[in-house]
Image: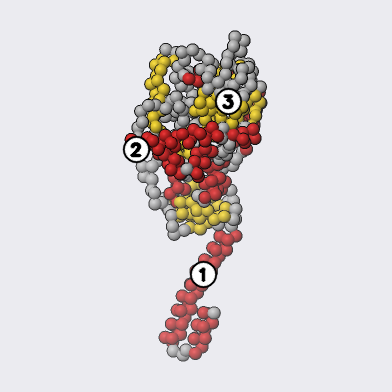
Amino acid sequence: MSTNFYLTLVVITQSEKAIMFVLNRIKSSQNILKILTNSAKRQIEVHNSSLLLKKQVDNNLTIKICGESLKFPHVWLRDNCQCEHCFHSTAKSRTIDWTNFNINIVPQNVTEDGKTIEVTWEDGHKSKYGVDWLKFRRFTPDGQKNYTESIYKSKKETWRGDQFQDICSKHDYNEIIQSDEALHNWLEKLSIFGVALIQNTPDNEAAIDKVVEKIGFTRRTHYGVKFVVQHVVNTSNVAYLSNNLQMHIDLPYYEYCPGVNMLHCLVQTQSKGGENLLSDAYYVAEYIKQNHPKEYQLLTETEIEWSDIGVEDGNEFFKLHRAPVICLDMHGEVTRINFSIPQRGSFFPGPLENVQPWYKAHKLFYDLNHKFMARFKTNAGDILTFDNIRLLHGRNAYEDNNSNVRKLIGAYVDWDEIYSRLRCLKVKLKNQSGIY
Ligand SMILES: [Fe+2]
Ligand SMILES: [Zn+2]
């Protein structure tokens, strides 16, 4: 179109000067055309690619993966370079030297071959990333949700006592010891519902050790590596009595509170009572949040001092820890429950005017946990496993006799160890690509 315009000008223009002017314009117009043609060609190349790579004016690189345009910040890409100079493949750890790290670095060139993306940076360094690896780390809300729930921590499902029989999964002791699938299934259910039952456990005090070894190791406390729950006169802990044991979490006075409680029932009482009581305090917390916002605020914001003072096996202890009943993270999600009538200290670390309202909120929490609790009785051979920082547990009173002495063996395992095993099993069993 523009060439025709200039040719027409040549025909009607007689002067040499005018002809030279028009010829120059044609030359420059050809240059423009050449640039336009190259640009169009480049665009076609880009559009023909399965992965659309486009350098942005902002600080992100946009990469099209499976039809979706995903943005990755330059600085994040450079920091997470997977080459052997920047990342140790067996330690699976970053080794990039940050002394001269340029947080404003910009890519010079980006290429892809369908499976990997190569970025050449302005300083000449080349980084390669797997497409699956990048996709798994996408910054979109759905990507963040997917990563969090599939590899970070399970999405919890809360329950009421009348739903307990449906949500409490049952697992076979020998299958857990022998099969990775069974081990994975148990730990996953435990992480989602906060409770799961292992059955057919051999009748000996060491049986629980094998289950613990499948995960890693126990959490030792001042009650030992393992602990025996049975009626003890002059006890160091009210759990070792046979009267009603009000619902509680174990060891709220530990800042690093044991995550999971495992109670192997060796001998169950033949007397009336002795039932296990369990309540999902995450359900109760949500209920209070919806129906009693003032009380929710008091339970989440008032620090309480939890304590345990005494002697066990000749070792003196004096444990104190301050935290609210309902602990929240920065997203407002419940991360831990603290609750124990006996292990709540007498010192109140808050202002005077908070005391009466807090007691009202505490009573509400107590009553609602009773309202929504499950009641059942484990049998000899059961290991009741439950989330100690989410569920409250207790027991109804019972009576021992000479031929029947109720006896449980307990052990704690931390969530750090359980989630670690669960992630290893996910990688092994599900061969999930892009995890690392
Ligand atoms: Fe307990
Ligand atoms: Zn590198």
Q: Is residue 22 above or below residue 247?
A: below
Question: Disc 1 vs disc 2: which is toward the camera?
Answer: 2
Quadrant position of residue 108: bottom left
Residue that appears at 54% across and 16% down: 230
Amino acid on which the number 3 mark rests in the picture: Asn
From the image, tell me which residue sits under label 3. Answer: 276
Label whose residue precedes the other's in the sequence (2 or 3): 3
Question: Disc 3 vs disc 1: which is toward the camera?
Answer: 3
Callout 3: few (<14), some (14-19), or many (20+) C-alpha neighbours within 10 Å? some
From the image, tell me which residue sits under label 2. Answer: 353
Label whose residue precedes the other's in the sequence (3 or 1): 1
Amino acid on which the number 1 mark rests in the picture: Leu
Question: Disc 2 vs disc 3: which is toward the camera?
Answer: 2
Viewer-closest of 185 and 62: 185
Residue that appears at 54% across and 67% down: 40
Amino acid on which the number 2 mark rests in the picture: Glu
In the rendered structure, find residue 36 and report the number of the disc placed on it: 1
Please provide percent x and percent y for residue 337.
Answer: 47, 33
Label whose residue precedes the other's in the sequence (1 or 2): 1
In three-dimensional space, the C-alpha distance between marks 2 and 3, rounded to whole angstroms, equals: 37 Å
Compared across the picture, whether 237 is left or right of 421 comes to: left
Residue that appears at 41% across and 51% down: 105
Element at badge 2?
helix
Work out whether residue 296 can be spotted. yes
Callout 1: few (<14), some (14-19), or many (20+) C-alpha neighbours within 10 Å? few
Residue that appears at 64% across and 32% down: 165
- Mark 3 and mark 1 residues within 8 Å of each other at the beta carbon: no
Please provide percent x and percent y for residue 369.
Answer: 52, 33
Q: Is residue 41 above or below residue 374?
A: below
